[in-house]
């Protein structure tokens, strides 16, 4: 197998944002007077699922359909003020893949503003000429078709002018694996990393193509697998 392109998920794979997501939900539950029962990231991760809107809000007692406009306002204000770093060492991976001639793009449920801000802060924007974000997705029932719908991946493949089997998708949740499986024009291999939003147990159950054995816990381990596909 020789790949020509990399499709990246963003949050949890490039951006080390799970702690901030934990803080956001704790904060918004406090604003609305709703109980937040999670004491640590691992407990929260076990229940975390996509699509976050409405899954996580419903789980925490919100009526997403009625409250989403105000929730989005609070969320955007929180994210504008948040200080979030990229995953340690992921910049070196991105730069090496670029030097090897691979095309790279991002398929994310995040917004363009949030993605591009973090890429600019870390001088990584030039490596991602293609970004498919929340605003680009078609709507269904007035909501973007987030993963596990495959739309963002299909759009990336089209913009890359590559077939699914010529790329690999890097994600951190079971919904990423499902989204790749829902691309019906060919098999899009998935590398699942366990340092992000998803537990290793959930990732194993989703049956990604890689890793074959132990979980990928660092960008260095991720890079080793990608090198084996070149």
Image: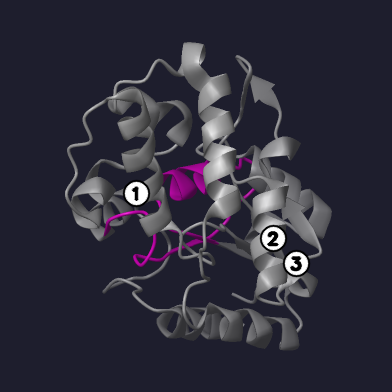
Q: Is residue 63 left or right of residue 82?
A: left
Residue 185 can be seen in this image: no
Q: Is residue 177 left or right of residue 4?
A: left
| Other-residue count near label 3 (Cα within 10 Å), few / some / many at <14 / 14–19 / ≥20 | some
Residue 120 in percent (x, y) is at 72, 69
Residue 148 in percent (x, y) is at 50, 38
Q: Which mark is residue 22?
A: 1
Mark sitting earlier along the chain (3/2): 2
Quadrant for the C terminus, please.
Answer: bottom right
Quadrant for residue 184, please give it.
Answer: top right
Q: Residue 178: within the magenta?
A: yes
Depth check: give the residue in front, 110 or 72.
72
Mark sitting earlier along the chain (2/1): 1
Quadrant for the N terminus, please.
Answer: bottom right
Q: Residue 175: within the magenta?
A: yes
Disc 2 to disc 1, C-alpha distance:
20 Å
Helix, strand or loop at disc 3?
loop
Stretch in magenta: 170-199
> Considering only vertical position in the picture, is 136 above or below 198?
above
Helix, strand or loop at disc 2?
helix
Q: Are marks 3 and 2 in contact (CB under 8 Å)?
A: no
Residue at screen point 25% across, 41% down: 47
Q: Which mark is residue 134?
A: none
Residue 167 in percent (x, y) is at 65, 64
Residue 136 can be seen in this image: yes
> Considering only vertical position in the picture, is 138 above or below 164?
above
Which residue position is annotated with label 3? 128
Which residue position is annotated with label 2? 117
Disc 1 to disc 3, C-alpha distance:
27 Å
């Amino acid at each position: 197998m020789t790949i020509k392109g990399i499709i990246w998920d963003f949050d949890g794979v490039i951006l080390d944002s799970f702690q901030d997501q934990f803080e956001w939900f704790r904060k918004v539950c406090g604003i609305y007077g709703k109980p937040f029962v999670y004491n640590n990231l691992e407990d929260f991760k076990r229940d975390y699922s996509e699509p976050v809107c409405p899954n996580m809000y419903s789980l925490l007692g919100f009526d997403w359909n009625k409250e989403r406009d105000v929730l989005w306002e609070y969320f955007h204000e929180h994210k504008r003020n948040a200080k979030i770093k990229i995953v340690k060492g992921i910049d070196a991976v991105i730069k090496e893949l670029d030097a090897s001639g691979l095309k790279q793009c991002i398929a994310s449920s995040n917004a363009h503003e949030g993605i591009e801000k973090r890429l600019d802060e870390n001088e990584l924007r030039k490596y991602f000429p293609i970004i498919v974000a929340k605003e680009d997705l078609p709507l269904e029932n007035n909501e973007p078709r987030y993963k596990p719908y495959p739309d963002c991946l299909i759009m990336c493949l089209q913009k890359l002018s590559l077939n699914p089997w010529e790329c690999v998708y890097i994600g951190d949740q079971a919904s990423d694996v499902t989204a790749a499986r829902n691309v019906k024009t060919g098999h899009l291999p998935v590398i699942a990393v366990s340092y992000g939003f998803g537990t290793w147990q959930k990732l194993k159950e989703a049956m990604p193509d890689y890793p074959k054995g132990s979980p990928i816990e660092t960008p260095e381990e991720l890079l080793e697998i990608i090198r084996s596909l070149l």
